[in-house]
């Protein structure tokens, strides 16, 4: 009997070990997200980052060249994104997986698993009881609102940022205790990677300040931290210097900070945006692949309830000695999420992607860990496992409701349109998918919706021009394109359509003229260049076709 008790005791001790608890979370994480390995391109950034850049990312020499260009330099609208480490991650993927897109999805899952391990270590570093650490890590690992970071390939931007900044935080904490050169060097290394994977890393600088003043509360620690904080700022200065050198739209990117009417944005965008994010965290069943700030969003009410509960918990269920840690966690959440409210499309609803919660949510979970009844409840292993089972089942349900919206371009854009039709990008994206599939009857009502929200604009006229073009109604298409050129006489997209129509009409000299004019304006437009290549091949001008195709290859693009 005593032998059985010893074996039972041994088994319980093993099940309750940190290694077992973390392993369980990692296994569940892989089970939750493994299906995404089979997902296809969704035509939102992933094609620009991977599909059309295979020739570029196949070349290891471009690891260095990545620091000399924008992350999506083929797309003028995103030319201000200078994120070389993200590009390098795709180069490393290409070296292993070539053009097999499943491998890029697998990397996203592996990055998430690394993040889960780091999160668990961070919770232990905060001296939380192991079952509290286990439960919070489970929430972070499986929460449906973080899904976009894992199953959408470009979402790795935020998991990489998480890995680099949390690693930098560990060495920051080590340096405060030891002042060792090794910790200083590793802090510099991970800070460099963080800043060059996503510029919003600079928002972690005030978080480190707040950690010193609210959590550590040690004058010696503050003095020791000054060199590290200074290095962090210098890293960002280096990033800005290089970004302005290699990205010709950096000025316009930063002008949004100064040109935004923040007094107007606070009640209309920022407060509703934070409430929507809070609502999705506490009630993760109204998610979107392309969410925008909307005062009618179903997540605002649960967000208000969540905010009230946080205030109530702070006032009545957080011990006096832990209140500053609770505040630190909330400030972590609000500060790191703030950049998402810088609207890069002024006049349009602000896009608030869910993957941007990946790092900020850590702060909210830190605050949650300081609530007394939470700590007491989760300190009991049976209660912790029961609540973990409940949360796993709830999150699995939320996961299955949303994950298949990322499986391909049709699913993605139909989901985006159903939740965020107020933003013209969803109409453009969905109509483009329908046109590529030849579903003209489905595309037409989407174009009508686009015309309703953007009447008499370049976007609406181009939409109808595209529809009529695919229907073969070229004269109607030309009428719409004429309206486009009245608004912008030098729009390459309109010229490309006109050139293609002239080609179909047998007016080859006019077609070539429009193609060349468009290329002169935008010589990095791959679709335009490939249209010109096709035109020259059909006309038997092979030398000219090779000359244009060489330009495409020089950009690292393959077809």
Image: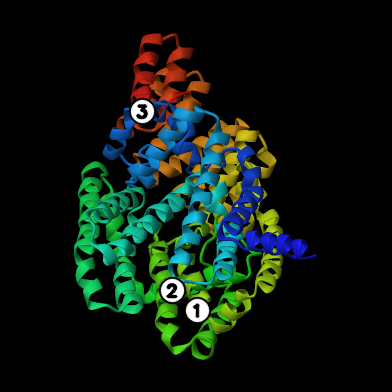
| Disc nearer the start of the sequence (2/3) | 3
Residue 543 in sight from this viewpoint: yes
| Disc nearer the start of the sequence (3/1) | 3
Q: Which residue is mark 1?
A: 370
| Disc nearer the start of the sequence (2/1) | 2
In the drawing, does residue 77 fall left or right of residue 97?
left
Mark 1: which secondary structure? loop
In the drawing, does residue 320 fall left or right of residue 142?
left
Contact flag, marks 2 and 1 (Cβ < 8 Å): yes
The percent coordinates of residue 260 (x first, y second) are 33, 67
Callout 2: 10 Å neighbours few (<14), some, many (20+)?
Answer: many
Q: Which residue is mark 3?
A: 60
Question: Residue 508's quadrant in the figure?
Answer: top left
Q: Which residue is mark 2?
A: 329
Real-space CA distance between mark 2 and mark 3, rounded to the nearest whole angstrom? 40 Å
The percent coordinates of residue 301 (x first, y second) are 60, 77
């Amino acid at each position: 009997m005593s032998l059985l008790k010893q074996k039972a005791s041994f088994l319980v001790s093993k099940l309750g070990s940190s290694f077992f608890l973390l392993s369980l979370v990692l296994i569940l994480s892989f089970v939750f997200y493994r299906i995404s390995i089979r997902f296809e391109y969704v035509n939102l950034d992933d094609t620009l980052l991977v599909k059309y850049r295979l020739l570029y990312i196949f070349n290891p020499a471009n690891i260095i060249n990545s620091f000399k260009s924008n992350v999506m330099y083929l797309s003028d609208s995103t030319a201000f994104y200078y994120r070389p480490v993200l590009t390098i991650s795709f180069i490393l993927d290409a070296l292993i997986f070539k053009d097999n897109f499943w491998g890029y999805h697998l990397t996203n899952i592996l990055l998430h698993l690394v993040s889960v391990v780091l999160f668990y270590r961070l919770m232990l570093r905060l001296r939380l009881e192991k079952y509290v650490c286990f439960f919070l890590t489970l929430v972070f690992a499986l929460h449906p609102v973080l899904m976009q970071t894992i199953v959408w390939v470009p979402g790795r931007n935020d998991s990489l940022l998480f890995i680099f900044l949390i690693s930098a935080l560990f060495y920051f904490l080590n340096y405060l205790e030891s002042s060792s050169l090794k910790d200083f060097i590793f802090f510099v290394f991970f800070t460099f990677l963080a800043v060059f994977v996503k510029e919003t890393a600079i928002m972690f600088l005030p978080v480190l300040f707040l950690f010193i003043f609210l959590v550590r509360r040690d004058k010696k620690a503050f003095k020791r931290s000054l060199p590290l904080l200074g290095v962090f700022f210098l890293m960002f200065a280096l990033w800005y210097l290089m970004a302005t050198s290699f990205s010709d739209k950096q000025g316009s990117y930063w002008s949004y900070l100064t040109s935004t009417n923040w007094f107007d944005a606070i009640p209309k965008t920022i407060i509703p945006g934070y409430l929507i994010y809070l609502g999705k965290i506490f009630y993760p069943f109204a998610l979107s692949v392309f969410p925008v700030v909307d005062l009618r969003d179903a997540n605002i009410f649960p967000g208000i309830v969540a905010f009230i509960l946080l205030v109530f918990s702070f006032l009545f269920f957080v011990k006096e000695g832990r209140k500053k840690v609770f505040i630190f966690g909330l400030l972590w959440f609000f500060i790191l999420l703030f950049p998402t409210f810088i609207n890069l499309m002024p006049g349009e609803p602000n896009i608030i992607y869910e993957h941007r919660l990946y790092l900020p949510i850590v702060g909210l979970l830190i605050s949650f860990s300081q609530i007394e009844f939470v700590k007491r409840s989760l300190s009991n292993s049976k209660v912790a496992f029961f609540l973990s089972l409940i949360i796993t089942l709830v999150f699995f349900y939320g996961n299955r409701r949303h994950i298949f919206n990322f499986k391909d371009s049709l699913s993605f854009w139909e989901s985006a349109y159903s939740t965020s039709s107020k933003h013209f990008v969803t109409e453009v994206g969905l109509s483009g998918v329908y046109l590529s599939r030849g579903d003209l009857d489905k595309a037409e009502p989407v174009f009508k919706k686009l015309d309703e929200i953007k009447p008499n604009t370049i976007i609406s006229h181009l939409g109808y021009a595209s529809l009529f073009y695919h229907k073969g109604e070229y004269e109607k298409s030309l009428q719409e394109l004429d309206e486009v050129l009245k608004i912008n006489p030098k729009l390459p997209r309109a010229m490309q359509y006109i050139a293609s129509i002239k080609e179909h009409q047998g007016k080859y000299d006019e077609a070539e003229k429009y193609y060349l004019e468009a290329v002169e304006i935008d010589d990095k437009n791959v679709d335009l260049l490939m249209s010109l290549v096709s035109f020259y091949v059909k006309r038997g001008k092979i030398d000219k076709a090779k000359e244009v195709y060489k330009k495409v290859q020089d950009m690292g693009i393959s077809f």
